[in-house]
Amino acid sequence: MNHLSRRDFLQVTAGAGAFASLMPPPAGHGAGPMWQPPAVGAGWFDKPMRWVQLTLVENDPGSFDPQFWLDYFRRLHADAATLSAGGIVAYYPTDVPLHHRSEWLGTSDPFGTLVAGCRTMGMHVVARTDPHAVRDDVHAAHPDWISHNADGQARRHWANPELWVTCALGPYNFELMDQVHREIVTKYKIDGIFSNRWAQQGGDCYCANCQKNFKDATGMELPKTTDRSDPARRAFVAWRKTRLTDLWKKWDATVRAANPDASFIPNGPPDLKTAGELAAIQFTDNQARRGVTPPWNNGRRAKEYRSVMGRRPIGGIFSVGLEEAYRWKDSVQSEPEIRLWVAEGTANGMRPWVTKFSGVLYDRRWLPVVERIYDWHYAHERYLRNEMPLARVAVLHSEQTAAEHPGVAQGDRHEDHMLGMYHSLIESRIPFELVHEAFLTPDRLDRFKLLILADAAALSDAQCGAIKDYVNRGGSLLATFSSSLYDEQGRRRGDFGLADLFGVSFDGKVEGPMQNSYLSLDADTASGARHPVLQGLEGTPRIINGAFRLAVRPTVDFPSPVTLIPTYPDLPMEDVYPRVKHTTTRELYLREIGKSRVAYIPWDIDRTLWDVMCVDHLRLLRNTIEWATNEPAPAIVSGPGVIDVTVWRQRDSMTVHLVNLTNPMMMKGPLREVIPVGSQQLTVRLPEGTRPRKVQLLTAGKSVDFKTTGQAITLTVPSIDVHEVVAIDL
Ligand SMILES: [Zn+2]
């Protein structure tokens, strides 16, 4: 991954806001009072639909054929390119001292050649720089530009020991790279600068500049540990984010001074909130899946970015190779894997951006694959220029919880709750979005009927207040486990911040990991009927429990559809019988408040689902989501398989994307083959005041019969190989 690792990202993110008020303005390197964020929707950024990136290697000049790439860009119908320009290696005749020209450059200007070729095709061009490493001459001239370890040693590059790692937060970036960016934009009038690995690489920096700047800003010495309870660590995380944000603003001001229509685009923002505040465009650097990752992870990144970017464009960077820890950068991935990964991004609103390292190709198998993907995209562009998602369910994306809340006990991990909830929504075929904790405003929240808190543990009082207001305005809420039990710094509250909404209070006890505990599925004592959330579970009086539960106490009256069967011995087999057959301890709290429905689940249904994938948990969770939403989904898709369903509005149309995830390699790629899934029946709700004029299947390439009933249409999609789009002209 060519950006902050997930861990770095969280570290950079952590403490955002919490310490901001303690921070004096940074000395020296700020962007100055003239800097203003770009207006949303301004400029060229929303125009390109298909991106390409060519990252040159140092010996490419003279060896690679620029015309081959330009011809390929043309065949891809690409309308924007990101091209290697400078940083570690300059691919143009730079005049900035210590900016290393490629040893193979001679008198050539491969960057300029590619820029000119792209311009003649009407493409937008962004220059790629990478500031994270330098050579011996720079180290000799400016030892103060080099990152230092905690023991005071200058830091060699971990992958190429001939290089030195630069300090990201000192004069190398604020001064030298600032000159480089000015030179590139001035010389070539390009549309932007995209910097790779612009945050600190290789570990925290302890150079003299960082020591001094941190002390000037906070009065503290740099932290020697990563212990988050250390005040110096917390201050450092906040300071680092502030410095990076200042660097972003400074580079952006420099770029815009040289070309008012251009912008600085970081590869990976300091945190998503900052991206929401500063960026005209963003790219997710999630190039392929690795390890045990479901394909929906690409769509998930799109949703995360959209939770702060809203309508602004998001590009999905994908590579054509394997993205594993061994980093075979010149490799080529299987065609079905590339197709599915890109389809997940497209279905979730990202614009494709193919990235390739090295202008000289060894393995060319990917070329026609990407060409076919881009051809399809180009042919259907008008149905892919989305105005807004039509999902009615949203899950809170809490970067704060990810950073501040490790879990309630050993074995509990916040991210597993999110992953389980995400997977359950995919399997349940419920279109959904993410909303970000920093933007819980009515304009962002009120288009959703249901907000889900998947163990959103760390919430501030203000965030709890915004959620209460949303419910008071008629929104519904589903919360699991320790949601709102901690404040924004991860300190446990005496009671849930949302106790009033849940109608329960925390009783002070966390139980788990539990062995051999169950849930009793109970009929209403008066009517004898079971609650609708138990639909599909008629055949059994009980299902398995999760692994962790919070002891809670109801403060209002509740129905009692699901109750606790406490843990009992699981060995020896002679002893495996419940000591208590039935309790009145509810494990699901359902209430109606005006037009709102509120469901609170005091155990880890989402985490355990991710852990053991129990179908009964999936059923109960899906039913509870549907009960709380209390309206039909915008698209109901029935038929075999696992399908990611997303629903979008364009100016004159709406689309339903169906991505076929059904594959034995779904949870661990790469895919070997495409396995088409059979007939799907769709019911699609049309936006109020619209009528369907024409319905097409974009991949099958044909119109389809449909039946109109009220404000809904029904139709059949006969088969999906990787990705089908139902496009409805309105
Ligand atoms: Zn430093």
Image: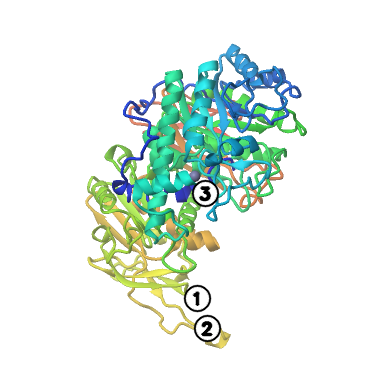
Crowd class of label 3 (few under 14; some 14 to 19; many from 20; radius 10 Å): few
Q: Sequence-wise, which precedes: disc 1 or disc 3? A: 3
Q: Residue furthest top?
A: 120
Q: Position of residue 249 (x, y in %)?
A: 40, 32
Element carrying mark 3: helix
Q: Name the residue under label 3.
A: 6
Q: Name the residue under label 2.
A: 576
Q: Looking at the image, which residue is at 40% across and 47% down?
A: 214
Give the amino acid type for the residue marked by disc 2 in the picture. Val
- Contact check, label 2 and label 1, Cβ < 8 Å: yes
Q: Position of residue 525 (x, y in %)?
A: 30, 71
Q: Looking at the image, which residue is at 57% across and 39% down?
A: 132
Q: Disc 3 and disc 2: Cα gap in Å?
A: 43 Å
Element carrying mark 1: loop
Q: Looking at the image, which residue is at 71% across and 33% down?
A: 366
Q: Mark 1 points at which residue?
A: 516
Crowd class of label 1 (few under 14; some 14 to 19; many from 20; radius 10 Å): some
Q: Position of residue 555 (x, y in %)?
A: 23, 67
Q: Is residue 336 above or below residue 124?
A: below
In front of the other: 434 or 640: 434
- Residue 653 quadrant: top left
Give the amino acid type for the residue marked by disc 1 in the picture. Asn
Q: Sequence-wise, which precedes: disc 3 or disc 2? A: 3
Element carrying mark 2: loop
**Relative side of 466 to 701, left or right:** left
